[in-house]
């Protein structure tokens, strides 16, 4: 038996627990399977966490359980999880009370399963937990789970099978199939993805870390004698290698979308034309987010409401026969979701925005949403570097800000040049460049509004980044 009282107390302190703002009312183990007898036993579980507000979520909990029922997260003894490599490589299934925990390893060698030589955890994650086996395979365990395919595993598997070279190859997976109690309405058949395994890639840096470092180096080269009128020329010269990298990232991003737009893909992935009702749904969501933000009018955005509405109306007015196609996309695309190394750019973490349901994350979207997310990330990089070296609105901040704005403009131009040069191969974008710009404006407004809500609650000093982004959308579209 697992002492769920102890488990209840432990959950709120876990970094990956995604419901910290709620009060737990109950923890119920819906199914469990023993991976190793121990002691302590290594047990994989599915637990329903019920909250005092009446909501409930499903969590995947690998646990170490003592004979007296005392329990702790298995990642507290990372060596206990070496067995995962063997289970995946051998394609084992572990029987639970109501179903089966399946382990698969199509890219693993059963004669030499990973985990025999070394294991370590990746400690910086927020919503999942990962471990590295033998410095060859990285296993990501999804923690907050739902019935249905997890897009991180689903897309990684598809892209690997399609031969897409710009991801770490997917080599293994963990899933559950069985009958689970549906909160008093009876049992239902479910399939739940619990984890994925990919090749561990060496000698790579996170895109955010690498670009932020390069922005700092760019700021270091700025001299008081530099002429203001030469900012664009000097920025292009001094950050030229960075812009080349970002143009390559645009090309890789387009290649991702070209792959996901192939008509030969199965139904869940085959591209579909963007229809007027899609545009209506997207613009209404953006308009609602705008109204919710303007209701408080903390930042003087109210006087710009008409201008924002005009940008949204431009999207609505586009020719319905030239809206492009909607496809499966990354869904949470920014510099923190890419790696740079000897092989160039690699794209990771296809799970989508963690606060959205799996159904929402699997919905086909305009690929320009991914583009908008990456463009907003350049804005963050330019300003985050300023935060690290100067007090906001200090003289140094004011001196560097025009250079940061120019860096961002050129970063956008190069990324878009690389993207648009390659994207035409997939025939999923509108043929009219003005239509692309109109769609991007709305997707960037939508993203910046989301960022504004996040920063208000977590980093109030950083609200200036999405606020500036909202103003920039208006300025850019006025200049066209």
Image: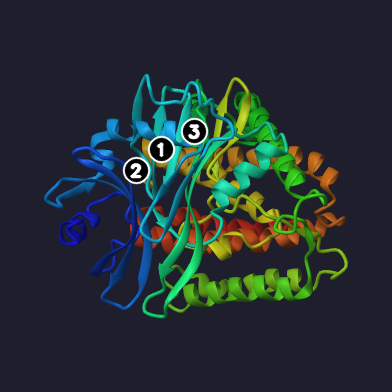
Q: Quadrant of residue 285?
A: bottom right
Could you say where residue 293 lies in the image, as x and y percent from the top left?
48, 72
Q: Which mark is residue 136?
A: none
Q: Residues within 10 Å of mark 1 (few under 14, many from 20)?
A: few
Q: Earlier in the sequence, mark 1 or mark 3?
A: 3
Whether residue 46 is visible to the viewer of this picture, yes or no, is: no
Is 24 left, or right, of 138 in this rendering? left
Colouring convention used in this rendered image of the protein: rainbow
Image point (52%, 75%), residue name: 302
Secondary structure state at the residue bearing disc 1: helix
Mark 1 or mark 3, whichever is nearer to me: 3
Q: Which residue is pictured at 81% across the width and 69% down the height?
A: 318
Name the residue located 35 percent from the left edge and 22 percent from the top edge. 118
Mark 1 and mark 2 residues within 8 Å of each other at the beta carbon: yes
Q: Residue 260: x, y in percent?
A: 73, 48
**Residues at marks 1 and 2, CA–CA distance in whole angstroms:** 8 Å
Q: Which mark is residue 391?
A: 2
User: Tag 3, which secondary structure?
Assistant: helix
Is the Cβ of the residue at disc 1 closer than 8 Å to that at disc 3?
no
The residue sitting at the left extreme is: 68
Q: CA distance from mark 1 to mark 3?
A: 59 Å
Residue to which mark 3 is pinned? 90
Dot 2: few (<14), some (14–19), or many (≥20) neighbours within 10 Å? Answer: few
Which residue was labeled with disc 1?
396
**Quarter of the figure that contains the C terminus:** bottom right
Q: Mark 1, mark 2: which one is toward the viewer?
A: 2
Residue 319: percent from left, percent from top: 86, 69
**In the foreground, 109 or 396:** 109
Is tag 2's residue or tag 3's residue first in the polypeptide sequence?
Answer: 3
């Amino acid at each position: 038996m697992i002492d769920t009282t102890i488990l209840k107390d432990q959950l709120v302190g876990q970094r990956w627990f995604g419901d910290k703002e709620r009060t737990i009312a109950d923890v119920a183990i819906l199914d469990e399977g023993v991976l190793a007898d121990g002691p302590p036993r290594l047990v994989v579980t599915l637990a329903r966490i019920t909250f005092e507000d009446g909501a409930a979520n499903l969590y995947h909990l690998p646990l170490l359980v003592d004979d007296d029922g005392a329990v702790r997260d298995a990642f507290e003894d990372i060596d206990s999880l070496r067995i995962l490599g063997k289970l995946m490589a051998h394609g084992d299934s572990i029987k639970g009370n109501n179903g089966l925990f399946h382990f698969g390893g199509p890219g693993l060698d059963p004669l030499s399963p990973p985990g025999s030589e070394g294991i370590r955890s990746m400690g910086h994650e927020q919503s999942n937990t990962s471990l590295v086996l033998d410095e060859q395979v990285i296993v990501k365990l999804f923690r907050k789970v739902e019935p249905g395919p997890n897009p991180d595993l689903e897309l990684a598997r598809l892209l690997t099978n399609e031969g897409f070279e710009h991801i770490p190859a997917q080599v293994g997976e963990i899933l559950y199939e069985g009958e689970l109690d549906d909160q008093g309405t009876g049992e239902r058949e479910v399939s739940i993805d619990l984890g994925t395994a990919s090749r561990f890639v060496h000698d790579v840096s996170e895109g955010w870390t690498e670009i932020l470092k390069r922005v700092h180096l760019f700021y270091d080269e700025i001299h008081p004698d530099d002429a203001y009128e030469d900012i664009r020329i000097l920025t292009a010269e001094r950050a030229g290698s960075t812009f080349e990298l970002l143009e390559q990232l645009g090309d890789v991003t387009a290649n991702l979308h070209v792959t996901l737009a192939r008509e030969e893909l199965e139904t869940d992935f085959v591209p579909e034309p963007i229809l007027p009702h899609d545009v209506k749904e997207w613009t209404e969501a953006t308009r609602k987010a705008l109204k919710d933000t303007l209701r408080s009018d903390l930042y003087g955005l109210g006087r710009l409401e008409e201008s924002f509405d005009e940008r949204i109306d431009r999207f609505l007015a586009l020719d319905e026969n030239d809206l492009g196609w909607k496809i499966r996309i990354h869904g949470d695309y920014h510099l923190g979701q890419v790696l740079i190394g000897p092989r160039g750019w690699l794209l990771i973490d296809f799970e989508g925005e963690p606060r959205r349901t799996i159904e929402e994350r699997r919905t086909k979207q305009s690929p320009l949403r991914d583009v908008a997310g990456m463009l907003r990330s350049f804005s963050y990089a330019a300003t985050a570097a300023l935060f690290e070296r100067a007090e906001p609105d200090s003289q140094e901040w004011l001196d560097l800000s025009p250079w940061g704005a120019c860096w961002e403009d050129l970063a956008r131009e190069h990324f878009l040049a690389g993207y648009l040069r390659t994207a035409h191969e997939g025939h999923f974008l509108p043929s009219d460049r003005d239509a692309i710009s109109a769609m991007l404006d709305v997707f960037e407004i939508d993203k910046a509004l989301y960022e504004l809500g996040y920063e208000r609650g977590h980093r109030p000093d950083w609200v200036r980044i999405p606020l500036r982004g909202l103003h920039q959308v208006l300025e850019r579209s006025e200049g066209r």
